[in-house]
Amino acid sequence: MKDIHMERVPECVKVSTDMNVLEEANVITANDRRKDYGDASVQVRNACAMWEVILNTKVTADQFCLCMIALKMTRQMANSKRDNMVDIAGYARVWEMCQ
């Protein structure tokens, strides 16, 4: 089965099926997502600002990343997929980028 999402990714940044989840998350956070959405730390700051309004409390980048990892963990528990593990690693990478 062909992955339709990979069709629009240039050859130089396509994720190899030989990559482990950490390597894949690194490629995605360094290339695809950065190109599509810009700097991850800016996106996290913006999301934290929105969550602060919704939750009426201060939200840090650490808290945001941990919450996103927790969401991905619950998805993995409900339906085990490699993509969930890649996302967990990706949010861990974003967390590091926010330091």
Image (spheres, rainbow, N blue to C red):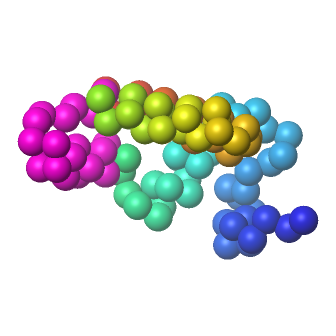
Does residue 31 belong to the magenta stretch? no
Q: Is residue 40 left or right of residue 83?
A: left
**Whole-percent x, y for residue 58 in the image:** 12, 34
Viewport quadrant of the C terminus: top left
- Total numbered badges shown on the rendered structure: 0
Q: Residue at x 55, y 53 (%)?
A: 31
Viewport quadrant of the N terminus: bottom right
Q: Which residues are magenta?
A: 41-62
- Is residue 58 or residue 44 the one in the foreground? 58
Does residue 42 belong to the magenta stretch? yes
Picture layout, residue 2 above or below residue 96: below
**Whole-percent x, y for residue 26 in the image:** 59, 39
Could you tell me if residue 91 is visible in this image?
no
- Most prominent secondary structure in the magenta stretch? helix
**Whole-percent x, y for residue 51 in the image:** 21, 46
Picture layout, residue 95 above or below residue 29: above
Could you tell me if residue 13 is visible in this image?
yes
Q: Residue furthest right?
A: 1
* Image-quadrant location for residue 61: top left
Picture layout, residue 70 above or below residue 8: above
Q: Residue at x 48, y 38 (%)?
A: 71
Q: Residue furthest front?
A: 78
Q: Is residue 32 left or right of residue 35?
A: right
Q: Is residue 93 left or right of residue 86?
A: left
- Is residue 52 or residue 25 the one in the foreground? 52
- Is residue 11 or residue 87 the one in the foreground? 87
Q: Residue at x 86, y 67 (%)?
A: 2
Q: Is residue 45 left or right of residue 76?
A: left
* Image-quadrant location for residue 37: bottom left
